[in-house]
Image (cartoon, rainbow, N blue to C red):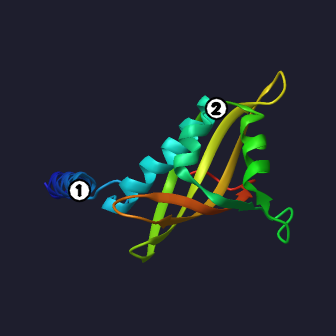
Amino acid sequence: MKVQNLATLVILLFMVTFLAFAEDRAIKPQGPPKNKLQVFFSELETQWLKAAQDKDPAALNRIVSDNFQQQTPASPGNSMSRSDWLLATFGRRVLSFQVRQLAVREISPTISVVSFVQTETYKETATAETDEKFIVDIWINSGAGDNWRCSDRYVSEIRGIPQK
């Protein structure tokens, strides 16, 4: 009789634990909820990547400011000018891209800092390559309404860091 009661108790404990775990998983959202700024800048960053993929200078001109520059760790004292950046951007064929782990910090109503991980598959030669980069963009809103344009981009390659 004691063995049977012990077995019943173990089964009940297992069921309660399993149900609590299942309920806990159902209640918790997967990842942090996206706020309004994250959604807005995620759309802008995606438009940017789509314009680069389509080699659409008019679309890029609406997103990137006239005085845009890009910094990398390879040459921290020398920024890449907008014209050099455009040549590099249009010099490769983007096959696919993904933006993830996007975060936004609003510095003021007219300045926001956006950081994210970008995965991009592209072709510069006969073989497709994929790389991951950590990117920080400085966005400035000038004029009336939502006239956001990126003034500065900081790019660093990611190597050996597991994906989330």
The amino acid at mark 1 is Val
> Which comes sooner in the sequence, label 1 or label 2?
1
The amino acid at mark 2 is Lys
Kindly indicate the quadrant of the structure image that contains residue 157. Answer: bottom right
Q: What's the mark number on residue 55?
A: 2
Left or right of 36? Residue 5 is left
In the image, what residue occupies the spot 41% across and 64% down?
A: 143
Residue 34 in picture, x, y percent from top left? 34, 58
Q: Nearer the viewer, mark 1 or mark 2?
A: 2
Residue 42 in picture, x, y percent from top left? 44, 51
Contact between labelled residues 2 and 1, with CB atoms less than 8 Å apart: no
Quadrant of image for the N terminus: bottom left
Q: Circle 2: is it few (<14), some (14-19), or many (20+) Cα within 10 Å?
A: some
Left or right of 58? Residue 11 is left
In the image, what residue occupies the spot 85% across and 66% down?
A: 78
Does 88 sit above or below residue 117?
above
Most foreground residue, 10 or 45: 45
Left or right of 76? Residue 162 is left
Q: CA distance from mark 1 to mark 2?
A: 64 Å
Most foreground residue, 61 or 162: 61
Residue 25 in picture, x, y percent from top left? 28, 54
> Which residue in the structure is indicated by mark 1?
10
